[in-house]
Amino acid sequence: MSESDVEIELSYLRKKLKREKIARMQAEVLLENKSSELFDINKRLQETNKQLDKIVAKRTRALRASAQRVETTSGKLETIVNRLNLVLDIANAVTWLLDIRQGTIDLAGKCESLLGIEPVKGMSIDDLMRRVHKNDRGSLNEALELAFHEGKAVNLRGRVMSRDGSYRWFQINGELTSLGTKRSLCIIGSCIEVHEQVVREREIWHAANHDALTQLPNRNYFETQFTELAGESFSSGESFTVALIDINDFTHINETYGHRVGDIVLHDLANVLKSYSDSIAHIARLSGDEYVMIFKQDIATFSAHELSQALIDECATLSIKDGERLGLSLTVGLAVFPKDGATLDDLMQSVRSAVQVGKQKKHIGSNCVLYNDAIERERMREKDIRLALKSAIRTQSFDIAFQPIMCREAQSFVGCEVLFRWPDMDPQWQIQDVIDVAENSGLILDLGEQVIDMALAKISCLADMGIDKWVSVNISPLQFQFRDVPQMISSAILKYNVDPEMLLIEVTENIFLENFTRVSAALSQLSKMGVRIAIDDFGSGYSSLRYVQLLPIDKIKIDKVFIDHVGSSTESQGIVEAVINMSHSMGYKVVAEGVETEAQLSVLNAMNCDYVQGYYYSKPVNFDQLIKLDDFSQTAPSVSETPIEDAS
């Protein structure tokens, strides 16, 4: 190898060595830099580890606390579940969860003891529905549909088959919710047995809406039924006929046969009415001996009339329980809805008006009356009288007239009967019509009190003038029924400071049919006060001599119907003579009402009739004329051309 070659080789080696030195130096610098970076990273890792340790420690403490809370909550939840199960047991409840999408239902709670079904999951809803009463399935299905589509809560009562196979009432409640990770729509709820409660409620409802004697619906339930039927009638445009049935003289049945038989009659009549169920939509007992029927809408009015007449014929020989045949007389009134009344009150007023017309003809027996225009006009007339009478009572716009009563033995005027007068009365009306309306509407109570007050005021005036004449006043049966008559008269006597013996109270025989015990006690009180008592219109009413014997009576007034023919009919003479002789034998004086002819007066004098009302003073007189009357020789001008009327 030459020197130049060696030199070249050395130069190459020196350069290589230099490059390696430089590379080593660069590597050392790089290593130093990396070491510094690693140191920094390690330092940061150490700090991070410290933070992680703190976080882990904190999380560990939190988890331990959470676990402790879970354990506590689990214990409480277990207690709550136990209590819930206890409540479900006590409440006889079943819990249920309906999966709408799957159409399955889960049951828990007392389903085994109540329904005879083991607690189950995934039971088919159809299988459960088959255990629901067929009449309640529709309403339950509808409630579930509304819950699913509209979110309405399920709240209804239904019958479900129980463990023993019978149907019992349950309160079924439920609400729409979503459960699970897929948030599946479900209806969750409960079934609580309420069978005994429903039975009690139905018993209470039945007692409140039905008559205990006949088991027919009562007035309260009838009004509800009528309202529903009237609504259907307005919607369909179809009418229906209503019949009101009233037993004629039912009080007489109670008096003759006793209240037990009376109850049997009411019960048996109800059964007869039920037998017409093919034609009748509703039947009810309104009160006492009053029944109402609503005929079905497809029953024409003339058919309803024929059916009512058939009812009358069937009851003509009603058989009571002991086999005795009892002829039952009925008055039936018919009216059509809405022609004769678009409300219950108006329709009942129409049908009662028809009954009232029939009652006026009850002497011919049972009667069936269809409401018509003539009855409507009469009803409106009575309405006008009633409204005017109410106003007149408030303003005390009445007066009284007097019908003189003559004594045969003394041959002088000894007393008078008070007659009600209304100076401002419509001239188209009659006094008796006004009195009838007052009786039927109850206004006779206030009107009668005003008449008594006016009569006592006039007695006081007579006493102040030294005129010793008695005054008689008619008392309505309604006053004895709804007023304390002795107290009312006693107050008036004290107010005007009059002698009670100057007052004669007149009562009709029919008053004894209402409440003999109450009337007898009131008349006894009046008698002890010194007030005298007369039986008015004797012979035209009940005519029970037993009552006459038991009551403190002073006078008997023979009804005008017997006096009318006493001068020409031997039969009438015999009746009148018998009444006079009987009355005298019992110590009573006799007044003959409505004496008009000389022949009547002659016969009555021959029979020793004590008093005559009429003949010499056949027209009423006013007070100024009254005080001038002293004996038969005077002739008094009348204050009214109106025939002699009974006082209120």
Image: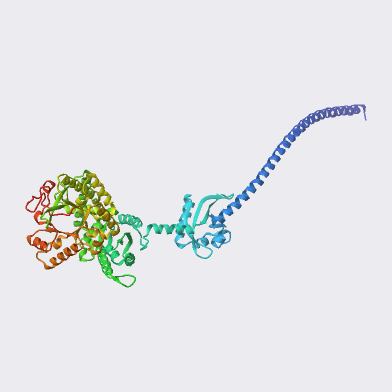
Q: Nearer the viewer, residue 190 or 147?
A: 190
Q: Nearer the viewer, residue 561 or 517?
A: 517
Residue drawn where x is 65% and y is 46% of the image: 72
Whole-percent x, y for residue 465 in the image:
14, 45
* Position of residue 179 in the picture relative to residue 585 (left or right): right
Corner quadrant of residue 532: bottom left
Q: How many marks?
A: 0
Whole-percent x, y for residue 122 in the image:
57, 58
Whole-percent x, y for residue 5 in the image:
90, 28
Colouring method of the image: rainbow
Residue drawn where x is 16% and y is 63% of the image: 580
Whole-percent x, y for residue 410 in the image:
11, 55
Q: Nearer the viewer, residue 484 or 160?
A: 484
Corner quadrant of residue 8: top right
* Position of residue 11 in the picture relative to residue 489 (left or right): right
* Position of residue 67 in the picture relative to residue 519 (left or right): right
